[in-house]
Image: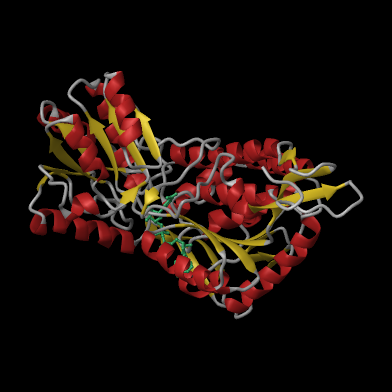
Amino acid sequence: MARKASTAKQDLAPELNFIGGRWVPAGGGETFPSRSPADTRKVVGTFPRSSAADVKAAVAAAQQGFAKWRLVPAPQRGWMLAACAKVLRERKEELSNLMSREMGKPLVEARGDVQEAIDCADYYAGEGRRWFGETTHSELPDKFAMSIRCPIGVCGMIAPWNFPVAIPAWKIFPAILCGNAVVFKPAEDSPACGAAFVKALEDAGVPEGVVNLVQGFGEECGVALVAHPDVRVISFTGSSETGSQIATACGKTLKRCSLEMGGKNAQIVLEDADLDLALEGALWGAFGTAGQRCTATSRLILHKKIRKEFVKRLIKAAGQLKIGDPLDEKNHYGPLVNEQQLKRVQRYVEIGRKDDGAKLVLGGKRIMAKGLEHGYFFEPTIFDEVKPNMRIAQEEIFGPVTAAIEVKSFEEAVEVLNGVPYGLSSAVYTRDVNRAFRAIRDLQAGITYVNGPTIGAEVHLPFGGVKNTGNGHREAGKQVLDIFSEWKSVYVDYSGRLQKAQIDVSG
Ligand code: NAD
């Protein structure tokens, strides 16, 4: 039995790179382990620590894959995505289980992560039949004019660990639908999920060279992927610090680069809100995935008439959350992803208490209860009486920590929500339709929810943020196709003579 289980794991997530349709070790033979954050004694797998040479091989394979794939008609590329959706659906449970073990997200959320990838494959499968351009009249007679979308070439995909299947799917499915080939580098904290995702695509029949996988560290193979002259697009999701370095490197080689980065999302609760609903939203938004979502609710902007009551109820509800093994479905959230993340959260709790002088009203400590002492578990943590300019209200913490800020009016709530360097997600709870629409107009964020929490994006709408969260692109929806395709304008002259635009005719 044991042997069978290990073969199944091997099949699901091969501990190798995937280059040109073959599973291969890193050229240098070095490896790194992926450990479970719920119990770091458990090794989920050992993966190749790739170098620039491995990236070079993967890019060369992708170029060969691209040469054939770009000629496959878009509807047929769509069929391939439908096949990917089918395999992912069949493996949903195994993939979710692997995800919970590898990066600590609770099983129920891991299933949502895989479902998002399935939704994404289904959605872009349909887009294969909507590979539309435009036709229009030329200003000259007997001349036809149109614009068409073209694939670009090799795309480098650099992903974080917090949505280790959904985010790669968001990038890879639209990229290959557009006729590109990709080199995918998963985060070093979720290599098994990355491998299992690519294995599903291989088993669905994605042709060799179209999707290539290189495992390893950002400063080694990530940097090499960004610098490679034959990579024409970089699609990155991760921290703003890394994104800024990548944008600089892409600028040097004039690469297109799409960046999805950090957030400091807020939920506004006005005095007329349904407080039960707002409370549920805050709990889910602030503590789901242990607060390690780019759209997590790390600020609660509360009208002064309800702040005390709301914080009191939130403390009670958050205090009852169950934290532990992410595979145990009774638990609300699991561990932080790694030691670095744990230290970061601990540092911000200290900053909140000492430097900022905010009032810590719940949590603030690592959980060392029996059975959890080998993992990176952290208490649900709430700060009250936070001022908008405090560091815990300005900087991304990425943990189960939220900051309650009191405001006197709707206008002040909007000002506070907008007063951070990020702009990913925002939420407003109110029963007043006029204020809801003003919030939609005035909140500086890529996403606004009315009477819903800051998390819950769907694949057919554009996803991304303003200010330091992004660089103007959007993933998901049909908007992402603009990242992965070039427009070409085509003029067909059937007059049989030389015709000169702007010269033969004028308005
Ligand atoms: P990170 O920036 O440390 O790493 C992200 C990826 O970049 C990893 O694969 C890493 O190996 C790679 N990388 C690191 N340095 C690199 C370099 N110099 N060149 C090329 N690649 C490099 O981020 P993380 O800690 O994995 O993820 C957490 C961050 O991601 C948070 O800030 C979060 O807000 C953000 N995030 C944003 C979104 C979004 O859509 N806006 C979604 C999820 C996560």
Q: Give percent across and percent down for residue 22.
A: 73, 65
How did the renderer colour the structure? secondary structure
Please report the residue visible at 34 percent of the width from the left and 53 percent of the height from the top. Answer: 336
Q: Give percent across and percent down for residue 249.
A: 49, 71
* Residue 31: quadrant of the picture: bottom right
Q: Residue furthest right?
A: 496
Left or right: where 314 falls relative to 44: left
From what the image shows, is residue 358 above or below residue 215?
Answer: above
* Residue 20: quadrant of the picture: bottom right
From what the image shows, is residue 186 above or below residue 482?
Answer: below
From what the image shows, is residue 464 above or below residue 187?
Answer: above
Please report the residue visible at 20 percent of the width from the left and 42 percent of the height from the top. Answer: 416
Please report the residue visible at 70 percent of the width from the left and 51 percent of the height from the top. Answer: 502
Tell me if I can see residue 16 in this picture. no
Toward the viewer: 61 or 438? 438
Q: How many marks on residues?
A: 0
Toward the viewer: 51 or 421? 421
From what the image shows, is residue 17 above or below residue 438?
Answer: below
Toward the viewer: 312 or 126? 126
Determine the quadrant in which ligand 1 lies: bottom left
Please report the residue visible at 15 percent of the width from the left and 40 percent of the height from the top. Answer: 405
- Quarter of the picture holding the C terminus: top right
Left or right: where 365 falls relative to 31: left
Left or right: where 274 falls relative to 189: left
Toward the viewer: 43 or 156? 156
Q: Residue furthest bottom?
A: 28
Q: Give percent across and percent down for residue 473.
A: 50, 50
Q: Give percent across and percent down for residue 146.
A: 75, 44
Tell me if I can see residue 149 in this picture. yes
Left or right: where 2 falls relative to 33: right
